Image (cartoon, rainbow, N blue to C red):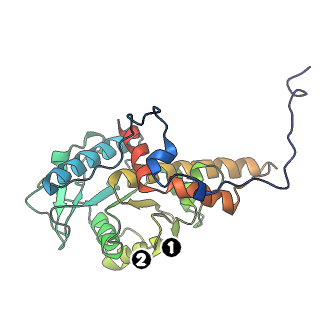
Amino acid sequence: MSAMSATTTVPEDASKHHQSIANQPKSLIERVSRADRDGKIKLQGIPVFTDKMEEREWIKEHMAAVFRFWGKMGYGEGLAGHITVVDPVEPSCYWMNPICVHFGIMTKSKLVLVGPDGYIRPEGAQLPINTAGFYIHSAIHKARPDVKAAGHTHTVYGKAWSVFGKPIDMLSQDSCLFYNNLGVYKNFGGIVLAHEEGENVAKSLGTSKNCILQNHGLLTVGETVDEMAHAFHALERACHVQLLSESAASNGHKINTIDDEDAAFTAATLTHPEAAYLVSVSDDE
């Protein structure tokens, strides 16, 4: 029997079974991991700090690690690319990478503390920052006080898919991270060198945590820099999958998308800040 003739096709079930998040543990850790029967082995989630200075150093360490991951993935593109994280000691300020320092060599000592006026503070590295990054990120942090971190850079597949000015489809389990969680800025107003353009980007993000900027690239936010980083990497890969799938579809292959009920069920776990944190930490190590 040939390999082709051995293939079995399972007919579609008209009464497809859907899982319910209501039947799952409320704790994300309990939902996604299993350990010993006595419960002595536990996956560690996002830490809680009582010392704000200790939290600041933890944030800077994770932020630098994310930059090095971006460098490893080849996400650097000229002077473009910036991440900001709200400072727990001075919440009106945020940490940001300096301009002209490659992602791959970032350390926490190179990070800059930016004040609410957009100028660098003495507590961090005394290095200049990206002007476009200031306008974009200051607008986002003002519009979205619920998020602590924001990241944007010009990646290959994100830029390629952005030219269509539309969101990605629910093509895989990983794509469901962006189910009802993705904005699109359907315009390109040039390099962001004014408050107004930064505000336009923030408006397009809306209440989502992810955004495709037409003819520009990707932007993601999160409650931690780890969540932001995981979402960014996942969105870049989702754009890659979308481009590959559409290329195959142009040759007559049918694309099967995930339905709303299953996408919503999957998103309920993938969009949890702790889930994104756990994945990002494993990526950075």
At x 21% / y 43%, what residue is drawn? 107
Amino acid type at mark 1: Asn
Query: Along the line of sight, which residue is nearer the eye, 76 or 280?
Result: 280
Mark 1 secondary-structure assignment: loop
User: Quadrant of residue 195 in the image?
Assistant: bottom left
Q: Mark 2 points at which residue?
A: 200
User: Quadrant of residue 80 in the image?
Assistant: bottom left
- Which mark, residue 187? 1
Q: In this view, does 234 lie above or below 146?
A: above
Left or right of residue 59: residue 24: right
Amino acid type at mark 2: Asn
Dots 1, 2 in contact, CB < 8 A: yes
Query: Along the line of sight, which residue is nearer the eye, 239 or 85?
Result: 85
At x 85% / y 41%, what residue is drawn? 10
Instruction: Tell me the distance, in whole angstroms, between the alpha carbons under discs 1 and 2.
Output: 9 Å
Q: Where is residue 15 in the image (x, y as percent from the top left)?
A: 83, 55
